[in-house]
Amino acid sequence: MSLVVVGSVAYDGVETPHGTVERMLGGACTYVSLAASFFTEAAVVAVVGDDFAPEDTRLLASHGIDLAGLERVPGQTFFWSGVYSPDMNDRTTLRTDLNVFAGFNPKLPEHYRSQPYLLLGNIQPSLQRSVREQMTAPRLVGGDTMNYWISDFKDELLAALKDWDFLLVNDSEARQLSGQHNLRRAAQAIFDMGPHTVVIKRGEYGAVLFRPEGHFIVPGYLLEDVFDPTGAGDSFAGGFFGYMASRGLDIKDDTAIPEIRRAVIYGSVMGSFCCEQFGVDRFRTLTRAEIDARFNEFKEFTCF
Amino acid sequence: MSLVVVGSVAYDGVETPHGTVERMLGGACTYVSLAASFFTEAAVVAVVGDDFAPEDTRLLASHGIDLAGLERVPGQTFFWSGVYSPDMNDRTTLRTDLNVFAGFNPKLPEHYRSQPYLLLGNIQPSLQRSVREQMTAPRLVGGDTMNYWISDFKDELLAALKDWDFLLVNDSEARQLSGQHNLRRAAQAIFDMGPHTVVIKRGEYGAVLFRPEGHFIVPGYLLEDVFDPTGAGDSFAGGFFGYMASRGLDIKDDTAIPEIRRAVIYGSVMGSFCCEQFGVDRFRTLTRAEIDARFNEFKEFTCF
């Protein structure tokens, strides 16, 4: 079943200890939809400028991604650039040019509105809410956010969040949103804001799925080389939600817990592959067989 | 079977967000032997001053710990104090008074020498080597070390390390020793120094067991309250090696891998309990039934 993804489609410049790329395809919506496309049909809602390259459109289309919601307007595509620390655990933003993204006002194509799965990527919370309201009756709505919206748009974020089935954020965002350092307490506080489930990404340390009846922890995959971590969290989201959609799952269904745990593993698998090459490059050649082999590796190195 | 443990027996002063304790029983040898005592007979090699309190001797004895190797000399017992950051991920040392520990020259009682299991706690590497040489033919030797010995006593450490079956250190120590940031590469480099197995502790993020044929990752237990992390790493070591000893395991035996993985879990269990109260207090009341219940919790929150 189709997964509708809203968020940024962008160009990124990154510098890691492995090299520098001045301009490559990026953006949360790009990573989420590409990662999800290995499991299900993805449909994007985003805006790009008239500089958006035909080969980038072709890459998305070649993954079966529905581009009816990819709006093209005059101007430049959102551009971000950053440099990673030698251990790649920190990064410094060098440039953020919102460009056409500054005027983004997502409008869902008619055939998107009845789709069952919706991922609200990290954009202005009232735009997330507007997208949610354009959907007829989605079975499952999940969303991401970031420090800027939590600190400066808290009311809008809380108004959007109360209608989400799950929140998918990193640990520092969960702490900032909840005001709780302890992750268990942070998840409890976020349950009270609306979401039934909270998925907390911990970068190289993996992820935790919190649900009212308990939690599930997956450690991070130990890569021998982290080439470029850009987009790993969004690829996690795509793998997680893509697998959920492919199985037609409802996150509130306790009988689906074994499948939901597998979705967390598939998220982790996609996040780990993302780091193996610059930008989205690993997804150009990745196969479902490689994905399933790594899923089995997770079983092997965590099983006791 | 008995596990001989050499290391510090000390008094600690700690300040955490939960309160301040000016003086409490501590030291690596104390935590290791207490944690191990829930699984096997532990025998300590350490030195204390004439201020060492009878109730502290009684606590160790009440856990069946062999104190024949606990030397008492005139003077004050090793004292350390420190203060934890609000999130307890960092601590600052306020005082380190080596006192009688400065002259520590471990001599093993005769009946210790034929024991099969030896844990060399974090002391001067040439003393670790001397203790190893006093043992007749131990089945399994493991050791710990720290940044100071790695930077200033590298040759002595490498000379000691080549005879160890496993090294048990935290991630920053593994990186410093190997010169490799990536943990997989760090473990490979340490294999070349002698140890067959490398156990890397990652604090709240758990631990990784590296062996030539592959690795096993366990995430950290998510406590709702971390009361005092002092001694958690040593309690991990005690649980890990104590369980190994209780089952008569050889770490180089590939058929024992399922049991060795369970030992990593028992280490994690003991490390998590240690954080629940100040110092060794949690071990005063802890039961084997509670330990096994938490072991099962690890299965529950990692299984998929």
Image: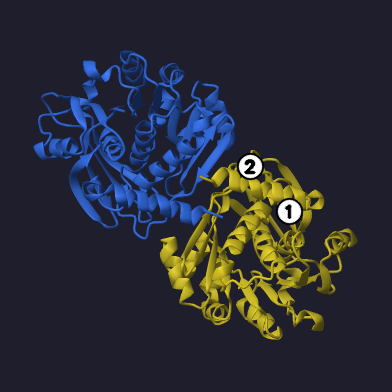
Chain colours: A yellow, B blue
Q: Residue at x 11, y 37 (%)?
A: B53
Q: Is residue A152 visible?
A: yes
Question: Badge 2 sits on which subunit?
Answer: A
Residue type, numbered disc 1? Gly
Estimate the x, y position of residue A225 in percent, counting from the top left: 66, 40
Question: Badge 1 sits on which subunit?
Answer: A
Q: Residue at x 47, y 70 (%)?
A: A212
Q: Mark 2 or mark 1, which is nearer the start of the sequence?
A: 1
Quarter of the image where one finds residue A30: bottom right
| Marks 1 & 2 on one chain | yes
Q: Is residue A22 visible?
A: no
**Residue at label 1?**
A13
Position above or below: A88 against A48: above
Q: Residue at x 44, y 52 (%)?
A: B298
Q: Nearer the viewer, residue B296 or A97?
A: B296
Callout 2: 10 Å neighbours few (<14), some, many (20+)? Answer: some
Instruction: Judge from the rendering whether residue A111 lies leftward or rightward of residue A191; answer left or right.
Output: right
Q: Nearer the viewer, residue B188 or B256?
A: B256
Q: Which mark is residue A223?
A: 2
Callout 1: 10 Å neighbours few (<14), some, many (20+)? Answer: many
Looking at the rendered structure, the secondary structure element under dot 2 is loop
Estimate the x, y position of residue A132 in percent, counting from the top left: 66, 81
Estimate the x, y position of residue B101 in percent, counting from the top left: 22, 26
Looking at the rendered structure, the secondary structure element under dot 1 is strand
Estimate the x, y position of residue B150 in percent, counting from the top left: 43, 26
Foreground: disc 1 or disc 2 = 2
